[in-house]
Image: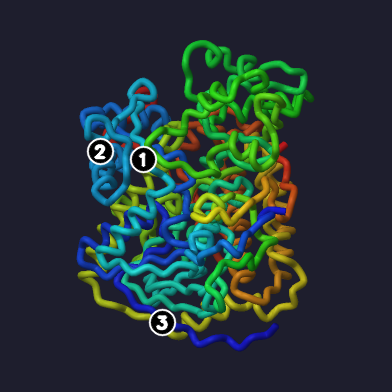
Amino acid sequence: MSSPIPTPTVVTTDVLVLGAGGAGMCAALRARETGAEVLMVDKCGIGYNGQVPIGGGILAYVYPSYVDEWVDKITRGSHFFNNQEWTRQFGSRMHQATMDLADLGLTFLKKDGEIDILTWGPHIHVTLFDAPKSLLALKKTAAARGIKMMDKIFAVDLLKRDDQVVGAVGLGLVDGKVYLFDAKATIIATGNCGYMHEKSYASVLGEGPAMGYRAGARLTNAEFNSLYVWGIKLLGKELMGIHFYLYLENALGEKIMGKYYPELMEGEHAVYTFDPRVIHAMYEEVKAGRGPIYLNLKGLSDSEIAHLGEDIVADLSHLMANDTMRLLREKAGIDPGRERLEMWPRYLYSGGGLRIDLQGRTTLPGLWAAGGACSNYWTNGAGSQAGLGVQSAAITGFVAGEDAGVWAVSSPRLGIDPVYAERAVARVLEPLGRPTEIDPYEVAYRVHEAIVPMKYNRVREAKRMREALDILASARELLDRVGVTDFHDLARRHSAESMLMAAEFTYRAALLREESRAQHFREDFPERDDANWRKWICIEPGEDGPKLFTVPVPVETYPLQPAEERER
Amino acid sequence: MAIRRFDREVCTGCGNCVAACPMDVLRLDEADGRAVVKYPADCIACWGCESFCPQGCFDVSPERARGELVSPY
């Protein structure tokens, strides 16, 4: 089908927020408080999608009196690789962000009328909130405060006038309109890239970082925080519940976790679905020929099994999609107490994102980023803590929203550059004119072949990563042959491109970093190399494709410095 | 497989399923306002529609519409 290019519909706002998940909602609400007109746009239905509703409803918490020690702990844990200024801002804002989220409508688990701050480990605290209904609650508040919302709009590219971002191009998935959003300030809050290998964050496909990069914004930390989760293969979904790890066994019927982590088999431990230790044990066992890995709950009663899934908290609602045992029984006719279940690691999420400063500003004027779409380098390498993702969405959202709002209220409107806009729309619509030779799914599947296998992405090594990049090069050839007939498929095509870009960035950065650090593990460079690699890898568009360069961590300007380094 | 049952007779057109679908599989029919499964092949079986449908219209299988995924090993 060769349709005529529809005349774009122009929508004007002060602050444009792309993505209405946790970060987008917080950004929009805070921007609105500055008096700015705010418009939130999402490719899905606002209130239901993004990562927050499907997550566990866990929000990390740090007591204000503990912030100094927390910053110290995170900094040392990351071997002084973090952005200490952001780490401090993050830690010191957690208390207020939690209270603000409650004021904005989130339902928290309470005790004696106060938000219940739970202790999940030494100095590890969380609060629990009603995740499935959280975005609907924030949406209600946003609507009451006059924030405009448009859902089922797929934003593809940013609009610029000279060097400044002045809005975005979007596809109306339902109405078939092309939208030009004319904004003084634009906030990307679309998450990073989930690749839809794991179901949980399937809507998050890298569109935001990709559009930021295409416009010239800097990305950073693409090699870090690549995350695998583990779950029941049949359901294709991560397994929530902190005690299931005790029941993992190999094909020979041997319990696997005690072989690698005997300390986990004694006393009480909370092992989450994203715990790298489980992924490590599964990988090693399968590599040694003792796969597949099973979850063996045989002989346990229904109530004993239910007890293992402790993520389900009374008084808070939960999605059917998170109630694994019920899904097994109802959907697959499997009684988990009677047969063992094959388990798979699943690739959940890529790391890194748009580089932001302490105000949430990217390197492009007029463009901010929040949540998964920006790089979480304030905890870089310090390991994960339950609920940091949601807290980071909230805090980066609040920070970016406030700064973008103040900026928009006090700055003139540059307006859309018609020449730039025409070119941008032509690029976005170009696959509509092509023959439908290749479906976008074939591109996405090819990207999975490069990004999902742990031999490429978890236990990294130069030759294998080049193999993965070759697979991605063939995915790019496929992408060039994708033709589509409607906006639904056009959006899938652009998502496939975003996934491809996220995967390319991950491997290019991982190849450059010739050391092992945090969860970036190089078989060929197994040691951490602070002398040469206490540097952040950045990516910007260059003349011949992505330009990679490093920026030394400015540790000498930070309050905390490694003593042993100074003495050298 | 994926959406293996959608009871259209019971659908009230509330739109929750359309909003909850991360893959844009569902739409509201312009004629009668009820949901339609417009792009069944793109369903990844996340159970979003089933979780948020107040009428219990959906039964979604464990498998995605497009089947097997790339192995992590």
**The disc label shown at residue A283, or none:** none
Residue A310 seen by the camera:
yes
A17 to A104, vertically: above or below = below
Percent from the top left, x then y, of residue A114? 23, 34
Q: Which residue is mark 2?
A: A95
Percent from the top left, x then y, of residue A436? 74, 74
Q: CA distance from mark 3 to mark 2?
A: 40 Å
What is the crowding at mark 1: few (fewer than 14 residues within 10 Å), some, or many (at least 20)? many
Going by the numbered disc 2, the residue's amino acid type is His
Residue A370 seen by the camera:
no
Percent from the top left, x then y, of residue A319? 50, 44
In screen coordinates, is A203 left or right of A343? Answer: left
A109 to A180, vertically: above or below = above
Asked whether the residues under the numbered discs 2 and 1 touch, taking CB atoms below 8 Å apart as contact, a structural biologist would say: no
Comparing A72 with A548, the one in front is A72
In screen coordinates, is A380 left or right of A415? Answer: right
| Label 2 residue SS | helix
A480 to A285, vertically: above or below = below
> Residue at point 62% right, 19% down?
A300
* Protein chain holding label 2: A
| Label 3 residue SS | strand
Q: Which residue is mark 1?
A: A129
Which image quadrant is residue A119 in? top left
Mark in front: 2 vs 1: 1
Q: Which residue is mark 3?
A: A10
> Residue at point 49% right, 68% down?
A152
